[in-house]
Amino acid sequence: MFRSTKQQCQAIRILLRSLRLDHLWTETEPTKQAVNYLAGSPMSHGEEVLLRCAFDFWNGEGRVELGRDLLGVLDNMRLERVLTLALAVNASAEAVDKWISSNGAFSGLADDLADLDKGIWGEYKHIKERRRS
């Protein structure tokens, strides 16, 4: 589960960032535009599915179905992000923190610069520094 609304919104914004839709969510809730888009929008099918996933993580109102919405609609990277976030939420708030650290570094939505040294980006920096020496 999520520890707080802040953590929940941060994870949702990271998820949406992969399609540059993070502007549809604030640090505390979805925007009015996001709520309107949930009812019907000019977005692509993939964008709509990702937004509906965000609402499922928010309040369960996205109503995404695995076979109809995720498989064959989202590319593997975005599908992996949705599913790994679901696993993290199911596990614990600490697992969500790890997911945020791993995925937020590339999205520009990490909590602070210390988060960039965690996860994949931190591993990349470590390998790059070893190669220099």
Image (cartoon, grey):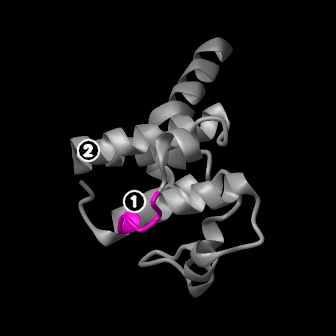
Residue 4 horizontal/vertical position (percent): 27, 67
Give the secondary structure at mark 1.
helix
Q: Which residue is mark 2?
A: 90
Q: Is residue 59 in the magenta section? A: yes
Q: Is residue 84 left or right of residue 34?
A: left
Corner quadrant of residue 111: bottom left
Q: Could you tell me the amino acid type at mark 1?
A: Phe
Q: Residue at x 55, y 80 (%)?
A: 35
Residue 95 lies in the magenta stretch: no
Mark 2 is on which residue type? Asn
Instruction: Inspect this view and state whether residue 108 appears.
Output: no
Image location of residue 11, percent across then percent down: 44, 57
- Quadrant into which the N terminus falls: bottom left
Q: Is residue 54 above or below residue 33?
A: above
Secondary structure of the residue carrying tag 2 is: helix
Compute the Cα span from label 1 to label 2: 11 Å
Residue picked out by circle 1? 57
Q: Which residues are magenta?
A: 58-63
